[in-house]
Amino acid sequence: MIIIGAILLILGLVTGIGLLWTIGIILLVIGLALWLLGAVGHAVGGRRHYW
């Protein structure tokens, strides 16, 4: 999610499409929040780990 958010953010900045830029920021923030929760040890999405 972080990678997709970063790609959309870059595409939005390069092409000048504000919607891509906004969606990229939202996905980047959500991805970072989920990553932080997982790193701290909280269950994310009902799982304590991915495998």
Image (tube, rainbow, N blue to C red):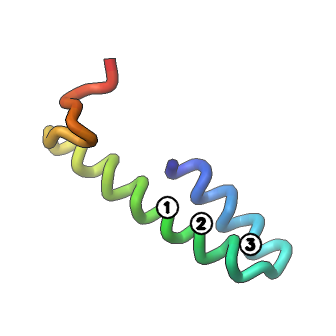
Residue in view at x 27 percent, y 51 percent: 36
Q: Is residue 40 left or right of residue 6?
A: left
Disc 2 crowd rating (10 Å Cα; few below 14, some 14-19, many 20+) is many
Q: Amino acid at mark 2?
A: Gly
Residue in view at x 53 percent, y 70 percent: 25
Q: Residue 16 at x, y = what percent?
A: 81, 81
Q: Who comes first in sequence, dot 1 or dot 3?
A: 3
- Tell me whether the residue at label 2 lies in contact with that at label 1, contact meaning CB atoms closer than 8 angstroms: yes
Q: Is residue 26 left or right of residue 17?
A: left
Q: Quadrant of the C terminus?
A: top left
The residue that disc 1 covers is 28
Q: Residue 28 at x, y = what percent?
A: 49, 61
Q: Who comes first in sequence, dot 2 or dot 3?
A: 3
The residue that disc 3 covers is 12
Q: Is residue 37 left or right of residue 3?
A: left
- Tell me whether the residue at label 2 lies in contact with that at label 3, contact meaning CB atoms closer than 8 angstroms: yes
The residue that disc 2 covers is 24
Q: Amino acid at mark 1?
A: Leu
